[in-house]
Image (spheres, rainbow, N blue to C red):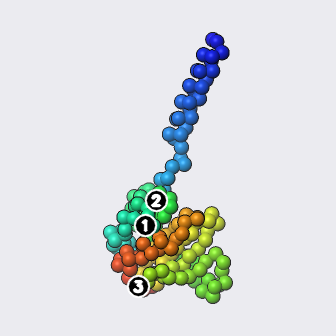
Amino acid sequence: MNSFRHRHTVLSALAVLITAAAGCSSADDSASAAVPSPDAKVTKLCQNLDEALPAKVDGESRDDPEPASELTAGWGGVAIILRCGVERPPKMADPKVANGNDADAVPGGVNGVDWLMETQDDGVRRFTTANREAYVEVKVVDGRDSTGVLIDLAPALKKAIPEGIAF
């Protein structure tokens, strides 16, 4: 085999391998989210929320994570993930947070919805509703301004999840 033909064959084989590897890559934008398992009352509230959620959040189109569930929603692949019916985060009852003495967790409110904001080790910001009959968690990827996300979600949350204490 001459040198040119051998290089061409090797390059062709390499191109096929690269193309196949790219097609099988797991580095796509599809998201997954663990589906919560709340009681029947909270499940109904979460189903109501699912119906009220906007098609776009912070400019991102709705793109629900796998597995499909009325208890989860997403926008922009992994950019924004919502889970309804989650457990109360431990920091929600931490006096250091309430007193403003925890650098990684801050309480606050946006457009009539109270939130606990936590910065996780991977830089993702996790927001969990407070003072509502169901806990709703929203994760926003690092670097994204989360204010627009919370503003866009507020009307649906106020409509579907009444104020009160979640158990």
Residue 87 in view in this figure: no
Could you classify mark 1 by the number of other residues whose Cα lies within 10 Å: few (under 14), some (14-19), or many (20 or more)?
A: some
Residue 99 sits in quarter = bottom right
Point out the frontmost of discs 3 and 1: 1
Q: Nearer the viewer, residue 117 or 41?
A: 117
Horizontal placement of 34 versus 9: left or right? left
Residue at horizontal 37%, vertical 74%?
156
Residue at horizontal 44%, vertical 56%?
66
The residue type indicated by label 2 comes to Gly
Residue 34 image offset from top left, x and y in percent: 48, 62
Residue 13 in view in this figure: yes
| Callouts 1 and 2 close, C-beta under 8 Å | yes
Q: Quadrant of the N terminus?
A: top right
Which residue was labeled with disc 3? 163
In the structure shown, which secondary structural element does the residue marked by tag 3 occupy?
Answer: loop
Residue 21 sits in quarter = top right
Q: Who comes first in sequence, dot 3 or dot 1? A: 1
The residue type indicated by label 3 comes to Glu
* Residue 57: assigned label: 1
Residue at horizontal 53%, vertical 43%?
25
* Residue 76: assigned label: 2
Residue 53 image offset from top left, x and y in percent: 37, 69
Mark 3 and mark 1: Cα distance apart in space: 22 Å
